[in-house]
Amino acid sequence: MEITFSKRILIFLITSVFVIATSSGQNKSNANISGFLSIDDTWEPIIFLSHIPSFDDMYVMSNEMIIAKTVIDSLGFFQFKIDFLPIEDNLYRLHIVKKGDTPATLIIGGKDENHFFIIANRSSQIKISNKLTSPPFRELSFINSKENYSFNKVNQMIFIADSVAAESSASKRLFIKNQLNRELLLVADTSNIFLVSLFAVYKSNFNSNDTSNMDFYKSYFKRWRNLDNSYIISVKNQLPIKNKPQSLSIFIILAMILSIVSYSFIRLVLRKTTKIKSLSIQERKIFELLQEGASNQEISNHFNIGLSTVKSHVSNIYSKLKVKSRKDIINMK
């Protein structure tokens, strides 16, 4: 007999209350990520856990990134024992695959998007549930995990803004982008959960040529100066402006002279660079393969992503760079 969604949620809640009530605190032996997932029969009943070492790697996929997998049973229940994880919070990705697809298949965007992200450490006790929707991880609930509730809320904020902007005029998109940036900086400034706060900075306009919020970013990294991990190092290294030396050296003077002499050339290069900087991390990687003459199938094989996802990325690249063909992209070298 098929168990209804409401009954499954009730079982999930009772199980969660029991776990919380019988645990005096989080400890290594009880560390786990578990929950109930509603998926249709087009998906393999297996869920994979991958470690994401930096925000730039969120949409990178390889077999080497997968650190665990477990079965989703007939009731939709799954559980990972995670006492082998680092003691500090790290970012992880959970994903499922369509039947017949390889485990290292990442679908980005669309109704078959197959992944979501989670913050965890070796002491975490995280409970997750979803609704039977398309894509399967669009609507998630977290129990006993304020970190992932907050992280998911930021992702939803970005998704809603992007969805509205996609159907808006250029002028309205600019307003939406600026409003989103303000909301992300507010999250970054007020959240005491490091990875949530840093992720909000990463998704803001922090690495653009706009320096209006540079004082905020400098103050922000000063606030977290005692942390030295791969996430904050990666973000800090992408800041467009570094601290300037107090006095001019001969090298700076020479650089100024050279910049004046080659002004016209630099303007041409900057036009291209500015356009390329508008691409996302994944789009830049695909752009590099397009410049080498790679086909959609070759790009799909290289990144282990679906052809429909490749076509979506290529279309976005054409739009952002204002080109009409692969020949135009090759000529940008």
Image (cartoon, rainbow, N blue to C red):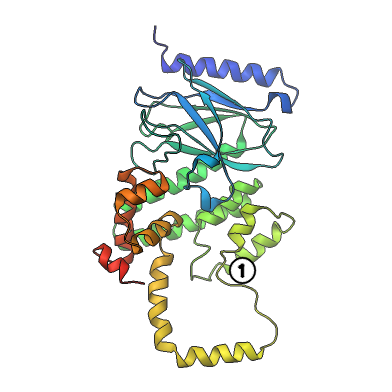
Residue 94: % across, % down? 51, 35
Q: Position of residue 246 (x, y in %)?
A: 70, 83
* Frontmost residue, 60 versus 32: 60
Q: Residues within 10 Å of mark 1 (few under 14, many from 20)?
A: few
Residue 99 in the image: above or below residue 106? above
Looking at the image, which is closer to me, 61 or 109? 61
Is residue 27 visible to the viewer in this orientation of the structure?
A: no
| Amino acid type of the residue tagged 1 in the rendering | Asp
Residue 132 image-quadrant placement = top left
Q: Is residue 252 above or below residue 126?
A: below
On the image, the x and y values in percent for residue 137 come to 44, 34
The spot of residue 330 in percent (x, y) is 31, 68
Does residue 53 show up?
A: yes
Q: Quadrant of residue 250?
A: bottom right
The answer to which image quadrant residue 67 occupies is top right
Residue sitting at x 33%, y 37% = 111
Residue placed at 30% from the left, 44% from the top? 308
Q: Quadrant of the N terminus?
A: top left
Residue projecting furthest to the left: 324
In the picture shown, does residue 197 fall above or below 4? below
Residue drawn at point x = 42 percent, y = 57 percent: 285
Location of the C terminus by quadrant is bottom left
> What residue is rendered at 44% in x and 60% in y?
178
Residue on which disc 1 sits? 215
Q: Is residue 270 above or below residue 132?
A: below
Q: Secondary structure at mark 1?
A: helix
Q: Is residue 73 left or right of residue 275?
A: right
Q: Is residue 196 left or right of residue 295?
A: right
Front residue of 71/222: it is 71
Residue found at the far top of this picture: 1
